[in-house]
Amino acid sequence: MIGLALAGGGARGSYQIGVYMALKKCHIKINGFVGTSIGAFNAAMLASGRDKELLSFWQNVNIGAILGLSDKFILELQENKWDMGLFKEGFSDLKKIIRNKGLKTKELMKVLDNLNIAAYLYKTKYDFGLVTVRFKDLKPLYLFKEDIPRDKLNEYILASCYLPIFRLEKIIDDHYYLDGGFYDNVPANALLNRGYDKVYAVDLKAIGIKRTYQDKKKIIEISPSRKLGSILNCNPKEINDNIKLGYYDTLKIVKKYDGNKYIFKSKSKRYYDRLVAKVSKNVLKEMQKLFRTTDNKQLVIKAVEYVMRQEKFSYFEIYNIKKIIKTLKKRKKYGVYRFINQL
């Protein structure tokens, strides 16, 4: 069986639907989903067979509205209008948060109610699990759908997402709960303990405790190759870029493509050795020192990626290294460009 473990990380969770879409594109069938915090929400939607709706959710999400912040504040924040108006609006929201002893969860619960996840989840054959922490005794709870009453599903998803920014309220059975990331932010072990043969673990590099995997041979870890932004990111473009980044990062891992920040179709080490065969010794030595590697494959890739960043190439594409080198040749004659010209 193959599982998907989704970490917590707030708005960074948009990355995870991109990961799933890439796995689906590669015809990898997932049998079970488990998540912490926003990962629990994503896992519940995916285990319900609603991946297209989850993609639409992230493409159109209004993080500010869900957190109960004013439309004006969010609009100006998205447009980076850091003026006095924004300050006043933000200060007003801050006073409201302090008065309420944290952000209210009313809008978040409304989102869960409107999605009606339980109506779909309990009809599917997929495993679903989440992690939360009971506040009273700080006991971690690993719960699968057979452990969660259908009418309490939304409350348990909320319990898994309960960061300290929210007003502390009793959610289930007269108990307070904390975000599952306080105990296990990448809950791959929950699936390993259930007998899964392989688990794709999606780590969003957010704050939280990461447990050691019980069997690393069964884990394929996927994490962002670039920064995903704040866990409270309200910028729609950045959220959509995170979706695309999740998609391409996953393709690179599954298909074993080359590249660090960009993606290149795989070529052998021998191919790269031939590329540098006619580079002058002085230039080669200079580049090895600059990029801190004597491995010809890594050297060429790092140099090409450096120039691609300068030339503002899109990250969201699969490139042919030979064609890219031809494209970059003769553009400039100094620095890293000189090395490219001699390949």
Image (cartoon, grey):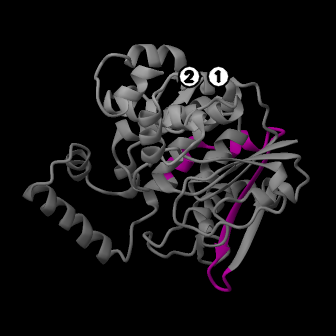
Eyeballing the image, is 59 above or below 290? above
Which image quadrant for residue 275?
top right
The residue lying at 41 percent from left, 28 percent from top is 339
Q: Check if residue 49 falls in the magenta segment.
A: no
Q: Specify whether 100 is left or right of 301.
A: left
Residue 266 locus on image (x, y percent):
65, 24
Give whichever of 169, 14 is nearer the camera: 14
Is residue 18 something that shows in the picture? no
Eyeballing the image, is 272 above or below 82? above
As drawn, the label of residue 275 is 2
> Mark 1 belongs to which amino acid?
Tyr
The residue lying at 48 percent from left, 21 percent from top is 343
Residue at the disc numbered 1? 271
Task: Say whether marks 1 and 2 touch (CB < 8 Å).
Answer: yes
Residue 268 locus on image (x, y percent):
69, 25
Q: Outermost residue, left direction?
A: 84
Q: Secondary structure at mark 1?
A: helix
Q: Specify whether 86 is left or right of 171.
A: left
> Mark 2 belongs to which amino acid?
Leu
Packing grade of label 1 (10 A; few <14, some 14-19, many >=20) is few
How far apart, in angstroms, are the residues tagged by discs 1 and 2? 6 Å
Task: Give the residues in magenta.
Answer: 110-138
Residue 303 locus on image (x, y percent):
45, 34
Give whichever of 212, 161 is nearer the camera: 212
